[in-house]
Image (cartoon, grey):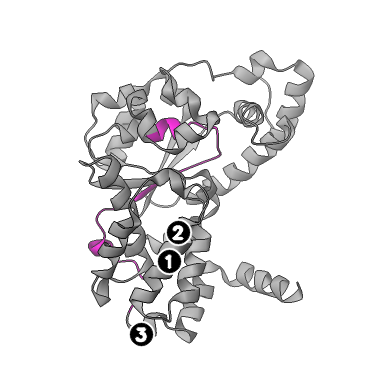
């Protein structure tokens, strides 16, 4: 316990990047045959993008809309990014073939990975064919997401990620993909808190409000340079074409009208079928979720929420 506290303190002081850089120097991966975390955008299939923000903020809706685009694929949530980096670093001293075997076994045991519905033998074949200069965690994840895309959306050429948990992983993502783009989904905290509670994802509405605050704090950290776009949930459901055109411009892909008919891909998205709290994505777009907390909560509960969220009520 004492050693864990010391390690956590060092990580807070030096940061993720410095810790892994030092570890890389002291413990070179694959016996010096490949870099540990040294992304080179030119060797990747595309520039990846990440949809971030608190859960119940419309990120699954945006994922469905983007998956309706002929050239975009976004897999089910990948909860194990940090664990994947740690696994890569811990096991990178062995031969590449042995590492790949262990990595695929590790991957298959991560939470909800069954919803990806991909053939890991195909991934193994692709990874074993990588040249020494192409071996890195960025290439591994690129091939993983690419395989998902080609399996379920054959015409895709661009992949993204939609995992709310990754809102807390800015340093880790930038470490692997320094050129990555980020779409931050933002929604009224009162409605998010209520939605989290009704979906059974928090024990009470107050916990939902605190979760929204926490994720908002982390989400704002991504606001660096030109690789960040904020999308307001309320605008997305009210004026979907306008917002989707903004997103497409940001991702440098043409807008496609079929993105407005996103519910057609609902059953192809894996985790949307497995988890009941995603069911609304299979329905037609509506604005029912706007202002729901003000309509459904008592004035006393609403005031408690607004106090936690530091929202000044509008009359």
The quarter of the picture where residue 101 lies is bottom left
Please give the name of the residue rendered at 51% of the width and 79% of the height, measured from the top-left corner. Answer: 23
Q: Which residue is mark 1?
A: 103
- Secondary structure under the numbered disc 1 in the rendered image: helix
Marks 1 and 2, how far apart at CA: 6 Å
Q: Is residue 207 left or right of residue 274?
A: right
* Magenta segment includes 269: no
Q: Nearer the viewer, mark 1 or mark 3?
A: 1
Q: Which mark is residue 32?
A: 3
What is the C-alpha distance between the residues marked 1 and 3?
19 Å
60 w.r.t. 287: above or below: below
The stretch in magenta equals: 34-63
Left or right of 217, for residue 254: left
- From the viewer's perspective, tell me whether residue 269 is left or right of residue 221: left
Q: Which residue is mark 2?
A: 107
Residue in view at x 65 percent, y 17 percent? 294
Please provide percent x and percent y for residue 110: 51, 55
Which sits in the foreground, 48 or 187? 48
């Amino acid at each position: 316990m004492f050693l864990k506290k010391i390690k956590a303190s060092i990580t807070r002081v030096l940061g993720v990047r410095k810790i892994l850089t030092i570890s890389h120097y002291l413990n070179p991966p694959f016996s010096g045959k490949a870099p540990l975390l040294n992304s080179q955008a030119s060797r990747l299939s595309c520039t990846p993008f990440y949809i971030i923000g608190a859960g119940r903020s419309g990120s699954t809706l945006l994922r469905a809309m983007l998956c309706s685009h002929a050239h975009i694929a976004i897999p089910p949530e990948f909860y194990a990014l940090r664990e994947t980096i740690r696994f890569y670093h811990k096991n990178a001293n062995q031969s590449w073939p042995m590492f790949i075997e262990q990595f695929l076994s590790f991957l298959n045991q991560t939470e909800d990975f069954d919803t990806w519905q991909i053939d890991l033998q195909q991934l193994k074949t692709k990874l074993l064919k990588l040249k020494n200069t192409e071996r890195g965690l960025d290439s591994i994840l690129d091939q993983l997401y690419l395989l998902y895309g080609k399996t379920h959306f054959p015409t895709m050429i661009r992949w993204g990620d939609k995992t709310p948990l990754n809102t807390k992983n800015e340093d880790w993502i930038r470490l692997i993909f320094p050129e990555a783009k980020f779409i931050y989904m933002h929604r009224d905290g009162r409605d998010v808190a209520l939605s989290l509670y009704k979906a059974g994802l928090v024990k009470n509405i107050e916990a939902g409000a605190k979760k929204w605050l926490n994720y908002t704090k982390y989400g704002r950290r991504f606001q660096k340079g030109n690789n960040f776009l904020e999308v307001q949930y309320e605008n997305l459901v009210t004026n979907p074409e306008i917002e989707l055109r903004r997103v497409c411009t940001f991702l440098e892909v043409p807008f496609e009208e079929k993105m407005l008919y996103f519910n057609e891909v609902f059953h192809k998205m894996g985790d949307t079928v497995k988890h009941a709290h995603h069911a609304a994505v299979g329905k037609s777009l509506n604005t029912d979720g706007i202002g729901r907390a003000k309509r459904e909560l008592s004035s006393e509960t609403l005031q408690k929420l607004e106090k936690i969220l530091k929202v000044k009520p509008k009359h």
